[in-house]
Image (cartoon, grey):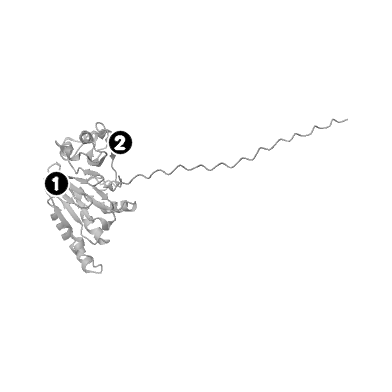
Amino acid sequence: MTTPKSPRKRVPKPAPKSAPKPAVPPPPAAPARIPDTLLVLLGTGTPIPEPDASGPALAIVHRGVSYLVDCGPGIVRRAMAAALAGVPGLTPPELTRLFITHLHSDHTAGLADLILTPWVVGRHVPIHIHGPPGTQSMVNHILAAYAEDIAIRVHGLERSSLRAVTPVVHEFKSAGVIHRDENLTVRAFRVRHGTWPHAFGFRFQAPDRAIVISGDTRPFPGIEKNYKAADILVHEAYSHAGFSRRTRDWQKYHGAFHTSALQLSRIAAAAQPKLLVMTHQLLFGDTPENMLAEVTSIYKGPAIYGKDLMVM
């Protein structure tokens, strides 16, 4: 006689899982306010031909109107790169205002490019150039050097404007206001750059920001007065550690013409800019990280090691 099998117990199926509720997206963050006045580093280099650092040049852009400072090699192409990245006012035909701190070749070797290239590609007005004594002579020699090119473009098939390729030069040799328009005021101040008789820095005062450009300078008594109440201070610098390894003759030269990161730290501590930006950096075998450590050893505010095409 077989024992009957007990009936199988039915295991209840688990209830179907409900689909997960879609996550509620967080409210969008308020967009960061873009200042009316921007600083664009177009070239942070030195006479050393480094591929990633074009010759000294920068732009102040206020509501789409650009004001260039210095014109080292590569300025027009760097400006176009910034324009393609979305910065207004920097296409070649819009490059119509230039301020030159001094006439050293690394700060002016792109002047012919700036006069001619935007004109060739569509600038219909002359560029206005503000610079120290000697600027007009430099412009005259550039125009003479390219006289045949200019004649062919003006009188040939292009029918380009002679007026538009002829810069309007405003020379100045004293400190004070050198330009004022509906956007901003530019004030020049004297600096000490070796044996140059005329070397200047600039203060660009817009309604929303004060941006100060040191130009090339060594430290001197009272230098920080030019930098007071700056929203951004753009200052040249060299590595103190790297400098200490240079030969005595080069130390004499750089000490007379330039500012070390340690010296800049003391100056910035006195001036207290809201942001310090190093440019025209000479590392002498040191690293950007070490230079930043030097410049923030006394000054404790925000500091940036500037690189080409930075926008702030």
Q: Residue at x 27, y 50 (%)?
A: 61
Among the 4 quarters of the image, the one containing residue 229: top left
**Do callouts 2 and 1 mark residues in contact (Cβ within 8 Å)?**
no
Residue neighbourhood size for the residue with mark 1, other residues' Cα within 10 Å, grouped as few (<14), some (14–19), many (≥20)? some
For mark 1, give the secondary structure.
Answer: strand
Residue 96 seen in this snapshot: yes
| Residue 230 in the image: above or below residue 95 | above
Taking depth in this image into account, of 9 and 293 the one nearest to the observer is 9
Residue 280 seen in this snapshot: no
Residue 78, image x and y in percent? 29, 51
Question: Which labelled disc corresponds to residue 176?
Answer: 1
Q: Amino acid at mark 1?
A: Gly
Residue neighbourhood size for the residue with mark 2, other residues' Cα within 10 Å, grouped as few (<14), some (14–19), many (≥20)? few
Q: Nearer the viewer, mark 2 or mark 1?
A: 1
Residue 300, image x and y in percent? 27, 33
Disc 2 marks which residue? Answer: 289
For mark 2, give the secondary structure.
Answer: helix
Question: Which labelled disc corresponds to residue 82?
Answer: none
Q: Residue at x 20, y 61 (%)?
A: 165
Give the residue at the far right of this rendering: 1
Horizontal relation, residue 210 to residue 14: left or right: left
Taking depth in this image into account, of 294 and 58 the one nearest to the observer is 58
The residues tagged by marks 2 and 1 sit, at their Cα atoms, a distance apart of 36 Å
Horizontal relation, residue 80 to residue 195: left or right: right
